[in-house]
Image (tube, coloured by chain):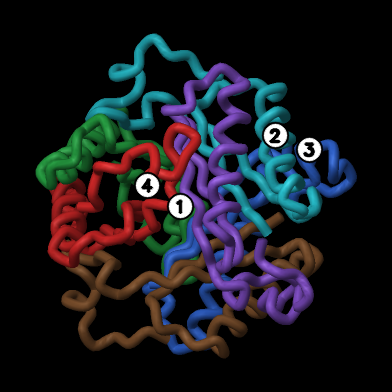
Chain colours: A brown, B red, C green, D blue, E cyan, F purple
Amino acid sequence: MPIIHVYMWKGISQESVNKVISGITNVFVEMNIPAQAVHIIVHEDPKAHWGIDGKPATESRPNVEPT
Amino acid sequence: MPIIHVYMWKGISQESVNKVISGITNVFVEMNIPAQAVHIIVHEDPKAHWGIDGKPATESRPNVEPT
Amino acid sequence: MPIIHVYMWKGISQESVNKVISGITNVFVEMNIPAQAVHIIVHEDPKAHWGIDGKPATESRPNVEPT
Amino acid sequence: MPIIHVYMWKGISQESVNKVISGITNVFVEMNIPAQAVHIIVHEDPKAHWGIDGKPATESRPNVEPT
Amino acid sequence: MPIIHVYMWKGISQESVNKVISGITNVFVEMNIPAQAVHIIVHEDPKAHWGIDGKPATESRPNVEPT
Amino acid sequence: MPIIHVYMWKGISQESVNKVISGITNVFVEMNIPAQAVHIIVHEDPKAHWGIDGKPATESRPNVEPT
């Protein structure tokens, strides 16, 4: 406890994954939850499978790159 | 708001993904929710990792193709 | 197949839930997937537990009502 | 993008929810993702419905309080 | 690892929750995964929010009771 | 009903997936839920995207292999 599922566009670097994991874990550590109790899964889904504004993000957000 | 996670068998075409995204978005637009507030992720999972009737769907649903 | 999880702000009426269920099911029926194969869960989460723009939606979207 | 689902034991205070939302949002802002693009849902589930070590956490973690 | 989310109709007894937790944990223990590494959340959602066959299960499955 | 999402480290064999599916289904069959009503998705996520103890499991659990 807690369990966190993060969904991002496919193409994220391992360095960014590491920042997501350490950063989110710290949020809970500052609330006095031990780091070893924090479980995080970073899921990647293709931008073309991600719908915003009725269209895949490849069309509705063409200029935004995966981080 | 809303956020929608759709889970389907791997192998769906981009054309079908687009229909899922536009169709589901329209359901909420008809309820007066703006399209830009509707976030949809279409996840693909292999048919062999999808259990129905105690077996992977490759065995329990051998004749059904991914859409 | 498919399985759909819908997340909305708490306070949705049963009539709206019914529209979400029938509307999303129809999207897949039009793709030749039988209605009885479409499983949808409509989850409600309090607007105060829903973060947008770094704050709960009760603060960042104060004038938007649950549907 | 991104979408984050956080699962915690029921009983969390609104102040803690706010910290989770602002803290996690900041992790992504530091990666140059705009705060308004970060969507977070903080779900609460009863400790008795949360299994660790083959038992509900009420039995396997009796002395740990929800934050 | 692993993390398991179970979604059931609201109304399940704590005795049934305990059986779900111990039973699923055992599946992984028999695969040589330690019980303390198995995390399970049993979510309850109202039968009226659960869509099957284009309708809430209260209508499409009127005679099936929550376990 | 029920719907179960299982998240494991990438690299699981199909034989293990089959055991997870049949084992979890049996847990519900023993509670008098018919096997054909039990839907399970076994998701695989890379160990490097799975955070425990503030780090990816490749670092915090280097000696544990995917099952």
**Which marked residue is nearer to the observer: mark 1 or mark 3?**
1
Chain of residue at mark 4:
B
* Mark 2, residue position: E23
Is residue D18 visible in this depiction of the protein?
no
| Amino acid type of the residue that numbered disc 4 sits on in the rendered structure | Thr
* Residue D40 vertical position relative to residue B31 in the rendered view, above or below: below
User: Where does label 3 land, which residue?
Assistant: D55
Residue at image coords 81%, 66%: A34
The tag earlier along the polypeptide, 4 or 1, is 1
Whole-percent x and y of residue A14?
A: 55, 86
Disc 3: CA contacts within 10 A as few (<14), some (14-19) or many (>=20): many
Q: Chain of mark 1?
A: B
In front of the other: label 1 or label 2? 1
Residue E10 visible in rendering: yes
Is circle 4 on the same chain as circle 3?
no
Q: Nearer the viewer, residue D48 or F50?
A: F50
Residue tagged by mark 4?
Answer: B58
